[in-house]
Structures are given as C-alpha cells and as structure tokens.
Image: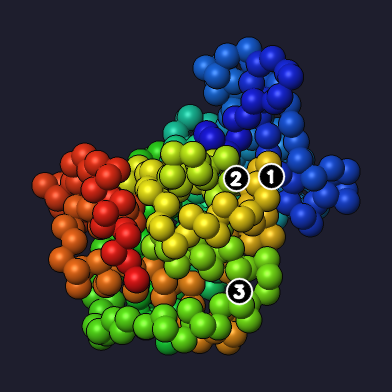
Amino acid sequence: MADYLKRRRGREGFFLQRSVPPDCRDVIGKATWTRKQGNTAAEAKRNVPQFLAETEQLIKEARGQKLTPSQKIRSLLPERGLVPADMDAHDLVSSVSREPMYLDSEGSVNPRYEELHEVAKGVLDGTAQDLKTPEDLLTRATLLKSPAPGTRFEWERYLGKLMEHTGKQYIQQITREDALSWRAGELERCQPSTVRTRLRFLNGLFGVAVEEGWVQSNPFFELTKRVRGRAKKKEVVLLDEADKDWTKLPQHHQLLWHLLRWTGSHASEAAGLRWSDIDLASGVIHFKSHETRPLKNDFRIRTIPIHKNLMPILKAQEFGEGLIFPWSYNPKRARWAEGMHWSDIIGVSPKATRDWAATCLREKDINESVIGRLFGHTPKTQTGVYGSVKLETMKRALDQLT
C-alpha cells in the first residue's frame, strides 16, 4: 500500500499515485497518475482496486494490446447476467473465436477449442477465474507487502525475465517444469548464491498468487534447497593503504568515505543520510528510514555515537538541508551508492570498511550484542535478539575501531 498511498503537502486527504510505464508516457501524456481518493486512509484503501483497474486499462490501451479469445470470454465475467439466456458455451466461443471444434473429418477434438469451451462454461456458471498478468501479481504483492523500492524493482525484473524465458503471458500458465527450466538456465550464467536470491524473489511472488487463489500451488516452492555454492572464506581487506589514498577519491565522495570508515554502516545506509540525521551537539548519528531510502528492517534503525576521528571531519562541514549525497541515488533501480568504483581508485570497495570494522572490534573482544547494535545486524536466532545497549557503552566500543 505504501507505494500507492500518499499525503501531499498543503492538501487535505489521501492520494493514490502510480507511475506511468515509460513506453506509455507519450500516448498517455503524463509520467504519473495522482488522484485524491478519500479523506481518510481507510477510504483511500477501499478505492485502490478501482484506481488500479482504471490505470491498468489505460496502459493496455496505450500499448495497443488486443484481447485474445480467452480474454474476451473472461471479460464477460462482470456482465454475465447480460449474456442472452439461450446462449450456451459453444455459442459464446463461436462469438469470439474462429477455432474449429474438430481438427479433422474423423472428429479429433481441437484442444484449443476445448480450452475455450471450458472457459466459456465457467463464465456462464460463474466459476471462471480471470487470468492474471505479471502486472496483476506485482500490483497485488506490492499492496500486501509494501516492499522497499529496490525489492520492487527486482521483483519486476526477474518476473519479467521468467515470462520472457517461458514465452507465456499469464501467471496461471507457469508450471513447475517452467520454474525448473528457468533455474537451470540461471545456474549456467550466475553464481549459486545469486540464483538463490532470484528464486526467493519469485517464490515470494508466487506465494502471493497461491494466497489469493490465483494458482493452486507455488511452482518455485523449495527450489532453493538444492542450489548449493562452495563456501568461501571471507577475506577481510586491511584499510592501511586506503587510509593514505582516500584523497584520490572524487571530492564529493570523500565525506562518504569517512562516514563508512568510522561507522561500519552499509554503503546504502550512509549514502542515504540527511544532514538532520547527524546531531553534533549530542555526538550521534541517527540511521532512520525515509521515503527514498527505507531501511531493510527494524534492527537497521539505530542511533550510534560519532567516532572520535569522525567528529572533527563532520564539524568542518557546512551543513545544509535534505540529503547529504543525493548524487549517489539511482532512481531507475531505486539503489544507493552503486558503481562508485572505489576499488579502482583506492584498492578497496565500500563494503570493505564494514567488514574491517566488525573484524577489528571482534579482535578486541567487544561483546557481540554491542557490535550488533552498532552495525544494525539482524540476530541469527530469536533468542539472540539484542537487548538495550547504552550509548556510552557503544561509544567506548566504537572508539576502539582503528
């Protein structure tokens, strides 16, 4: 729901907003649909299905999509009461398709006609279910799960690749064999860990389809079980040379380097910071979710002390409004801090700073719960959920980062 439901500054009520696909914008004449749908959130939520149906129809018209015979029959579902009483399933098929009932003079049944006949019978008796497109599934999953923009991008990307691989149009057409074939193709091109991630995206999407009653079973269920990669020992890169060479980075990258170096945060977390998230008076940095940079989970939402080496660097900055590093955001992929090429310039990636920070503190016997609080780690077990850690304790620990 978060992707569609919006508040507008200076305007009362709740608005529904949806981006127009880039290939349809010239025809539709705008980049975004924005429509007031109620004075309360509950009222606006009730209007979401109609809003999505109307905009989906405009997209189809803009793309010049023609209905297949099956779609034409299913399109009568809301109006089946208007179908003449003397029209049977054969008449309904004949009205939308030229498929012959038999393939030859010997009476061999045409399987395509038989499929359409079953659809027509379902429309007439009220049991037929509309075929769902990938767009239908993405829309419903977004409403139910409110994913981060980056996750939503990956859903759309890999669901699209799946449909392209199978050559099929509808979610109900995807079989277990299709899923196995897609997995095999991905394993030929990618590392097992990458394939597992993509399979998890698709498993989650088709799990929604099962919950909604669109399909009987999830074709991607448990497909990650047999995808095994060879375990690699993580090599922690020392930062000695990078500490000497950071001035070689582009000037607008240098503050981001210092933040990553002395906070141990994820690159996306630091890149999405706002000036207001840094409180020099209290000596802390607040990692908070915001519309452009939502954090992965509640463990990532945290307040940490400013390292003694970072404080003078921050005090030398001219604080402004809004994002500190707006240049680091890629709106097309909804990703932060991608493609900075630090390895080519100073010999280490942004991630190396986080790996070193955790390793350094562990080597100094800092309690794991303190490390978890500082770096926003997700506990591996429920019993491992971190309790309260005082700010003073975190500061003493973080100041041991060298």
Q: Quadrant of residue 2?
A: top right
Q: Which residue is mark 3?
A: 340
Q: Which residue is mark 2?
A: 275
Looking at the rendered structure, the kind of residue marked 2 is: Trp
Q: Residue at x 43, y 45 (%)?
A: 284
Badge 3 or badge 2: first in the primary sequence: 2
Q: Work out which quarter of the rendered image holds the C terminus and state it.
A: bottom left
Badge 1 or badge 3: first in the primary sequence: 1
Q: CA distance from mark 1 to mark 3?
A: 23 Å
Q: Quadrant of residue 81?
A: top right
Foreground residue, 401 or 119? 401
Q: Residue 384's spot in the image, x, y percent?
A: 14, 50
Do the residues under discs 1 and 3 have CB atoms within 8 angstroms? no
Looking at the rendered structure, the kind of residue marked 1 is: Gly
Q: Which residue is mark 1?
A: 320
Q: Residue furthest left?
A: 383
Q: Quadrant of residue 38?
A: top right
